[in-house]
């Protein structure tokens, strides 16, 4: 009986095929990781955008430091 209970549960980290587009604001690319395209996933890891794909409140400051770090590397 316990096996049937677990068969019906769907993990919350599974991305459905319906949302195959990147959830970044205005992005039309196909999602690759966690609902983001490769570029926006990097932005998400750096804290530039939220998990919903919206820009962070201090986006300009973080983007400046993000681009400076990319150029230095």
Image (tube, grey):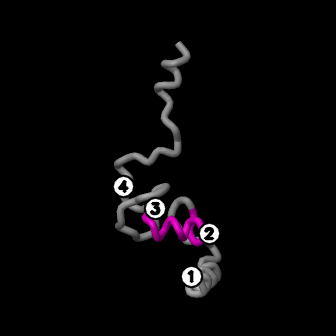
| Residues tagged 1 and 2 counted as in contact (Cβ below 8 A) | no
- Please tell me which residue is depicted at 49% across the width and 55% down the height of the picture: 34
Looking at the image, the residue that sits furthest to the front is 73
Q: Is residue 32 above or below residue 9?
A: below
Where does label 2 land, which residue?
47
Q: Which mark is residue 12?
A: none
How would you rate the neighbour count of disc 2 (Cα within 10 Å): few for under 14, some for 14-19, many for 20 or more?
some
> What residue sits right under mark 4 in the picture?
20
Q: Is residue 46 magenta?
A: yes
Q: Which residue is mark 1?
A: 70
- Name the spot of residue 70 as percent of width and height, x first: 56, 82
Please say if 61 is above or below 50: below
What residue appears at the point 48 percent right and 18 percent down from the top-left corner? 4
Give the structural element (helix, strand or loop) at label 2: loop
Neighbourhood count class around disc 3 (C-alpha, 10 Å): few under 14, some 14–19, many 20 upward: many
Tell me the residue that label 3 is attached to: 36
User: In what quadrant of the picture does the C terminus appear?
Assistant: bottom right
Instruction: Name the N-terminal-most of marks 1 and 4.
Output: 4
The mark nearer the N terminus, 1 or 3, is 3
* Spatial CA span between label 1 and label 4: 28 Å
Confirm whether the magenta stretch covers residue 27. no
Q: Which residues are magenta?
A: 37-50
Q: Give coordinates of residue 22: x percent, y percent.
A: 41, 62
């Amino acid at each position: 009986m316990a096996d049937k209970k677990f068969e019906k549960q769907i993990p919350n980290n599974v991305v459905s095929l319906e949302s195959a587009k990147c959830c970044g604001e205005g992005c039309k690319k196909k999602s690759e990781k966690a609902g983001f395209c490769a570029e926006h996933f990097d932005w998400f890891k750096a804290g530039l955008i939220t998990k919903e794909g919206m820009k962070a409140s201090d986006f300009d400051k973080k983007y400046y430091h993000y681009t400076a770090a990319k150029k230095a590397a």
